[in-house]
Each structure stands twice: as C-alpha cells, then as structure tokens.
Amino acid sequence: MTDILFQSQENIAIITFNRPKVLNAFRRAMFQQLIDMLETVANDDSIHVLLLTGAGRAFSAGIDLEELSHLFDGSTTAEQAHAELDEMQELTRRMVNLPKPIISAINGVAVGVGAEVAIASDIRIASKSAYFQFAEVMRGIFETNGVMHRLPRLIGMGRGAHVMLTGERISAQSALDMGLVTKVVPPDMILQEGMDIARAIASNAPISIRLIKEVLHRSYDLDLESVMRLETDGMLECYASEDMQEGVRAFLEKRAPVFKGK
C-alpha cells in the first residue's frame, strides 16, 4: 500500500495520507515523499491549490513511535539525530514557501506531526469528529515543524501555551472557537467542503493568490510600512499581468474570467 496518495483534478492537487490501520502515522520516508509531492505541485502550472487529507478516521496520529527507538538506544549520534530533525522540519519550510495555497481537510485525529502539518497549511477545516492534540509533553519529547512560531500566531500566546503544556485534546468546536480552523462540517462532508474551498481558490487569479500567500506570511515579522511596500510591489506586478486585464475585461463583459497566471 502506498503511504501517500497523489492525484490532481480541476487545477487542484489532492494528497491523502494513506496508512489508515495506524491512523496515518508518519514513517520517516513519508517526509521526503511529501516534500517530493510539494515540489511537483510547485512546478506544475496547471495546479493552483493543494488539498491535504487523511484516509480512514485520522488525518495523522503523528510520528510512528516505533521508528523513534533508534534515537535513544545508543545507535544514533547527535549529528545524525540533528540531520533527521532538519529533514522533518524541511517539510514546514516547503509548505510555507509553496507559492500555492494549502488546505488541510482534517477528517479525524490530528496529533503531533498531524497537527503540525495542519498548522503549516494556509487554511484548515475540520470534521466534527476531528480533534487536535499536542501530546509531545506527555511523551517526553518536543514540538517541531515550526509549531512554536506558527501556533501562537494562530490562536494567541496564552492558548498556545495552554494546549502545548497540558497536552489536552482540542475538539473541532474548540479549534473553531480559538481560530485554529475556519469551519467545522459533518464527517461525511469534509472532503466535499475542502474541494469546494479549493475550487473557489483555483478559479481566482494565480498571481494574486501567490502574492497574498507570500505577503501574509511575511507580514508576521514586518511593520506596517514594510507590508504596505510589499502591497505596492504586488499591485504593480498585477498591473503588468495579462490576468488583471482579463479580470477587468471579464467584469465589464459580465462573464467568468479565464486566468492564465501571466
């Protein structure tokens, strides 16, 4: 069985974590597989948005703990452990820097790496049966994949500290209340809802989409004037594009635009 499934349709790439018998727990090899798929999405101009989800009743239950035993049995040097962790964290770098939006349709359990992958996405929606958990503190390990940077920016420092220090489960409704997800839907509607959002994004101008994602992420660490300069640069790039001409023309002609990303 393939650990991660990849398909594309309607300008949308769909990646499905596919180890349902173990709640889609990540093996080490899956990190590089996912990075390779992100590279495919980045280089394929026909793909405008990426949708992530899980097979079965989990999004992902995190790292397959059976694969961590080598880290504390004396067979791994500190340098090797550092290299493994950097490989894991490269996934977040690739997701954040992907020039196309990523939606996580969280169909069930999202723990550890599962929660981290969701947080590295641009939009998160959840099934009513889903829950998040940052259980690292309960296993004597520590968050990775940029959680310390991204989670407080999503839900606030106090809430971030609370859920990471306690390791308590966060229900789908609580995740919605705190801003961790933007929508909660019935379990049988999660993939459809994810696709509906993906289609809405994919129908918009690719240049505008890329610029919005880029500037939103950079705005975390910039002041107002710096962000407004980026907005000006983005608008000038749009002015020079064929897509802006098409967008205005389509509005005046009362028809749907046909964007080409140019």
Image (cartoon, rainbow, N blue to C red):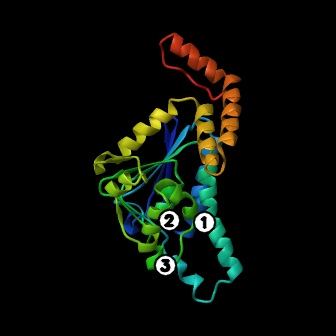
Alpha carbon distance from label 3 to label 1: 16 Å
Q: Which of the numbered marks, if any, corresponds to residue 88?
A: 1
User: Tag 3's secondary structure?
Assistant: helix
Per the model, the C-alpha gap separating discs 1 and 2 is 9 Å
| First in residue order: circle 3 vs circle 1 | 3
> Which amino acid does the dot numbered 2 rest on?
Val
The residue that appears at 70% across and 42% down in the rendered structure is 226
Compared with residue 83, is residue 106 higher up or lower down, i.e. above or below? above
- Residue 39 can be seen, yes or no: no
Image quarter for residue 42? top right
Residue 253 versus residue 222 in the image, above or below: above
Mark 1 or 2 closer to N-term? 1
Identify the residue shown where x is 39% and y is 66%.
23
* Amino acid at pointer 1: Met
Tell whether label 2 touches label 1 (CB within 8 Å). yes
Q: Return the x and y of residue 262 as percentages of the image width and height.
A: 67, 27
> Which dot, 3 or 1, sits closer to the camera?
1
Is residue 257 shown to the viewer in this render? Answer: yes
- Which residue is depicted at the point 46% across and 69% down? 164
Specify which label sits upstream in the sequence, 2 or 3: 3
Q: Which residue is mark 2?
A: 113
The residue that label 3 is drawn on is: 66
Q: Position of residue 197 (x, y in %)?
A: 43, 38
Horizontal arrangement in the rendering, residue 54 relative to residue 171 (left or right): right
